[in-house]
Image (cartoon, rainbow, N blue to C red):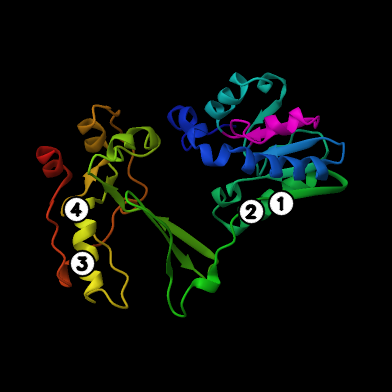
Amino acid sequence: MHDDRLFDEKIAATYDDDKGISAPEVIEPAVDLLAELAGGGRALEFAIGTGRIALPLARKGVQVEGIELSRPMVSRLRAKEGGAEISVAIGDMVTTDVARRFSLVYLVFNTINNLTSQDAQLACFRNAAAHLEPGGHFLIEVGVPPLQRLPVGETILAFDHGETHWGIDEYDVVNQNFSVRFPFVYGDGDGHLESLPKYVGSWHPAQRMSTIPHRDIATAMKLALNGSFDRRVVNVADEAPASIYELSDMLGARMDSSAEPLSNPWYLLVDSSLARSLGFRASVRTVYQAQQEA
């Protein structure tokens, strides 16, 4: 079984471009720990991807195999030096059985979060256990939600922010779940909008996305600083969300249309009605206006 929708060819082609996750200071300690846990035995990587961890681990003398759902990701692994020597079973990490036992099974880079139910995560643990030799190890790398920083009664916490991007976690502490929202900020020649097509290959072309230019981040910050937003979580956006198809077409990167229904039409939209009621007015009403004024 395979599923190339989430990590398709467009995503696979740029997956290794993030130098932060491939930096030696990130890779080397992880590989050293995995080699130690393997203890001279074989290792199996769930969701092996492009071989970011598996290849350097194999170079340390560990016999590595993998399971991977996405064929384009495996193609990138195969194209790298040493990639052809690593055995990879195409399938999901919940049910795929490679019919061998290992001293180490590992799953890194928050990939356990791709299994969005407790039942699926437990099934992944069972599959790992079924692949382990007696006394073997199952290692998972995953971020631990910083719930200590969450004020009593609140559910939203910013985990990253910069000139072109804010990342916000929304926690469901009762059901032990959280969602991530990324308001899309662009403008002032930062190239953020121009980079969009390489990230949206797996998204539905009719999916609409809220956007806001730098100029109106400044507008919102002025209101925040004068106290208008005190003790509130406020979303700010322009007045007309654009579809992924429209944004890609605007940038000269045409997408294929789709007759498939949208699974979640609200996924990339933010409700900015509270901001408007508190005095926020977008000076750039649409991304088309921003394009015309550029």
Q: Nearer the viewer, mark 3 or mark 1?
A: 3
The mark that comes first in sequence, 4 or 3, is 4
The mark that comes first in sequence, 2 or 4, is 2
Residue type at the position of mark 4:
Arg
Q: Residues within 10 Å of mark 3 (few under 14, many from 20)?
A: some
Q: Mark 2 sits on what residue?
A: 121
Disc 1/disc 2 C-alpha distance (Å):
6 Å
Disc 2/disc 4 C-alpha distance (Å):
43 Å
* Residue closest to the eye, 57 or 181: 57
* Residue closest to the eye, 90 or 33: 33
Q: Mark 3 sits on what residue?
A: 222
Residue type at the position of mark 1:
Phe
Disc 4/disc 3 C-alpha distance (Å):
11 Å
Asked if residue 84 is positioned above or below residue 45 in the image, the reply reads: above
**Contact between labelled residues 2 and 3, with CB atoms less than 8 Å apart:** no
Q: Residue at x 46, y 77 (%)?
A: 151
Find numbered disc 4 in the image and state the secondary structure of the residue it sits on: helix
In the image, which disc is placed on residue 215?
A: 4
Q: Mark 1 sits on what residue?
A: 125
